[in-house]
Amino acid sequence: MFKNIAFWGLALTVAVVSTFMALGSVYKVRNPELATGLWPTNGFAFAQQTNLDLKSAFTKNHGSFPDKFSDQTMVNAVEAFKKEPVAYRAIRMIALNEFVNNDVDDARALMRLVGHIVKRDQVTNMWLAQDYGNLGDVQSLLLNYDRTLRSSAPASAVLLPLMAQSLSKEEFIEPYFLLLLTDPPWAQAFWKAATSQSASISNAAILRAKLHEKNIDNLPYIDAAFLRQAVRTGNYDAAWQLYGKLAGRPLTRGKQILNNSDFSEPSVLPPIEWEVFSTGSVGAAIAHERKSLEISVIQGDSGVAARQFVKLAPGNYQLAVDVESSVVFNEQPLLKFVFTCAKNQSCGERNISIMIDKKNLEKRFRIETEEENYFWVNILTIPNDQIDGYDIDVRSISLRKEV
């Protein structure tokens, strides 16, 4: 199933390169050739020499395994193994030689032996990951990725995006779930990578919900970014269902449709909770201690102060708004609510705009759609050249569907 997938080979290539870059900084102060010439000969020195030979062959072949390793390299590897049977670099070299000679079964057996001897050798882990991928063993593939990520910071730049990309395949959900239950140190970086992969969003939402059920909840910042990305990429159902799990609330909120309609709580998971904005001339913030959405406007400018992502069925609705302002309304609207369909092509109607021209306003309107749809509830300021600036405190916003 996984044969000939290019990115496994790419991952192996980069991991090998990063490994030898690190090894080079250590071995430049050593002389394994001298050590192999001393009596009695040192098996580990022979193994180190094969490691340098592998680096040299890899470099000369422009980042790929050569078609053949030199005879002297293999002599050194065999000599190292004879003198030190646990010299894993020697066993690895013999395994790689079997591999380039197309004896995959022997190479596999030897590489798995190396994997039992040492857990942090990147070349071994990445070779095994590729091999397990070719065999369709996803759990073992990810286990070797985990070992590599725990031992190599440079490998994360290559592996994490590929891992996030692989989550687009449904069969990866359960193996990732089992692995992430261990709370690996790379978990947060993995979720950051996952938020950038639109093709993986739906499965990532399922994975995140499964982890939440097991009380893996140390990702509030990542969860918010994930919900934003899911909404931005049009994965509305995935975002909506995941929010229901994370917030511990039913997806239907009873008669009150808006989250935090009285602004008594901080907004943790926008945009399904309030998302507030601050620009050069319009700024908004939730002051949950005062139960208020505070909006400040400079020179009567216009802009979006806050918004929330909601799900509305066809029918009649009632909007009730309670505001306080530093200026008198005098029938002059300072705010407006705009209901914008997230799926523009499916709503079949224009945006719905409701002007707020008094401190306590109740307004009825109708959603004309054939089925339930996702909407943005936007709170916008209205330009007014006669006012230098003003402050508005929105005390509550109630949105209910009439029976």
Image: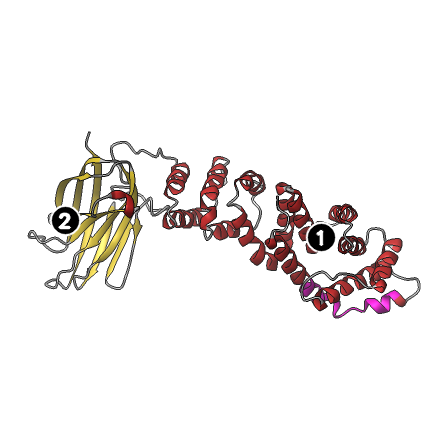
Q: Which residues are magenta?
A: 20-36
| Residue 162 position within the rendered picture, expressed as x and y whole percent measured from the top left | 55, 52
Count the marks. 2
Quadrant of the rendered image containing residue 280: bottom left
Crowding around mark 2 (Cα neighbors within 10 Å: few <14, some 14 to 19, many 20+) is: many
Could you tell me the amino acid type at mark 2? Ile
Depth check: 370 or 172 in front?
A: 370
Is 24 inside the magenta-drawn segment? Answer: yes
Q: Find disc 2 in the rendering and name its residue.
A: 356
Task: Classify the position of the C terminus by image quarter.
Answer: top left
Q: Is residue 290 visible?
A: no
On residue 232, which mark appears? Answer: none
Label 2 vs label 1: CA separation? 66 Å
Say if the magenta span includes residue 86.
no
Which disc, if any, is residue 124?
A: 1
Secondary structure of the residue carrying numbered label 2: strand
In the current view of this chain or complex, which residue is farthest to the right?
39
Circle 1: residue type: Thr
Left or right placement of residue 177 versus residue 124 in this view: left
Element type at mark 1: helix
Q: What's the residue at 26%, 58% (across, down)? A: 283
110 shown above or below 71:
above
Task: Name the main secondary structure of what is drawn in magenta.
Answer: helix
